[in-house]
Image (tube, helix red, strand yellow):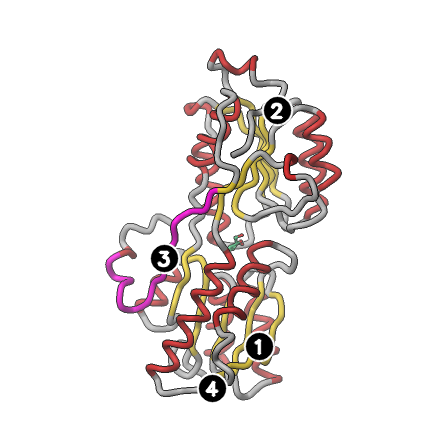
Amino acid sequence: ACGGGGKKDAAKKDNKEITIGFSQVGAESDWRVANTKSMKEALSAGNGFKLSFADAQQKQENQTKAVREFISQGVDVIAIAPVTETGWETVLKEAKEAGIPVITVDRQIKTSDDSLVSCWVGSDFKKEGVEAGKWLIKDMEKKGKKAANIAVLQGTIGSSAEIGRTKGFKEGIKDAKDFKIIASQTGEFTQAKGQEVMESFLKQYKNIDVVVAQNDNMAFGAIDALKAAGKKPGKDVTIISFDAVKAALKEVQNGQINAEFECNPLHGPRVADLAKKLMNGEKVEKVQYVEEQVFTKDNVDKFINERQY
Ligand code: AHR
């Protein structure tokens, strides 16, 4: 568990509004848009917050600038959805010196000093990757196939979402000796780049059996590229994706995506709760993973209607 919220704790005990700066990755995916909406709703005036929101457009240097601005504004709490895992030491030290607690959300940060981040809430990306690999082994077994050529559309290189899913997937397929990752490149978590990279994979490799898209928007791009190349996504080529936004669950229903590994974007209420607790000097869990599940044609009908994003 981590400690309280620094110098400003005492002043916040009287239920005044909490000022919070949130540095968001960008608007690269449907998942991200849902995450921003959740954060803005939970960190609203009606809920006792005054939010400064900064969109980093997928650039870490923009996040560093935003955090410095939040420090000079003297916010009570800083929340960061970090683009990349590393490169945070200096600016987080500045926040610590100013007595402002930092909550990381969604992706994680690596620092040599654990005390620079008060707590984190998000997904277990590595677990998602492991599950995806294990699912693929079972699926291929069902189809009577022992070997598979796999193409991976990676997310933003150096983001904990990419690192975890890449490592996890490799771990998940490690016992399947004839599963080969023949191509791996970043599609930056966007549909356009996902499509572009898939087009270039298809020009280079005629023998792709499986596409692992590290998020739904890249899967959408890959589906378009496969169709344009005369292939049937979900049938000629197995498609695995992460996030499970509503549009992707529809693709599971219609058979163009074979399996969806959920990544939950609705962190707003959790961050609001953590910020309030930190301001009250309460102890909170340092690391908090959210519950996630797998969707395939077998169970998707039960869940699709309740999906809000
Ligand atoms: O960090 C979470 C990832 O970032 C989501 O999988 C992706 O859609 C988003 O852009």
Residue on which disc 2 sits: 75
Check contact, mark 1 vs mark 2: CB within 8 A.
no
Confirm or reject: label 3 Cβ below 8 Å from ligand 1: no
What amino acid is found at the position of numbered circle 4 in the picture?
A: Ala
- Which segment is the magenta one? 288-302
Residue 157 vertical position relative to residue 79 in the rendered view, above or below: below
Q: Nearer the viewer, mark 4 or mark 1?
A: 4
What amino acid is found at the position of numbered circle 1 in the picture?
A: Glu
Q: Earlier in the sequence, mark 1 or mark 2?
A: 2
Image side of residue 107 versus residue 70, left or right: left
Q: Name the residue located 49 percent from the left edge and 46 percent from the top edge.
A: 122
Q: Could you tell me which secondary element the residue under label 1 belongs to? A: helix
Residue on which disc 1 sits: 199
Tell me residue 270's x, y (percent).
Answer: 44, 36
Residue 147 circle label = 4
Q: Earlier in the sequence, mark 1 or mark 3?
A: 1
Residue on which disc 3 sits: 293
Q: Could you tell me which secondary element the residue under label 3 belongs to? A: loop
Circle 2 crowding by C-alpha within 10 Å: few under 14, some 14–19, many from 20? many
Tell me residue 61's x, y (percent).
Answer: 72, 45
Circle 3 crowding by C-alpha within 10 Å: few under 14, some 14–19, many from 20? few
Q: Is residue 291 magenta?
A: yes
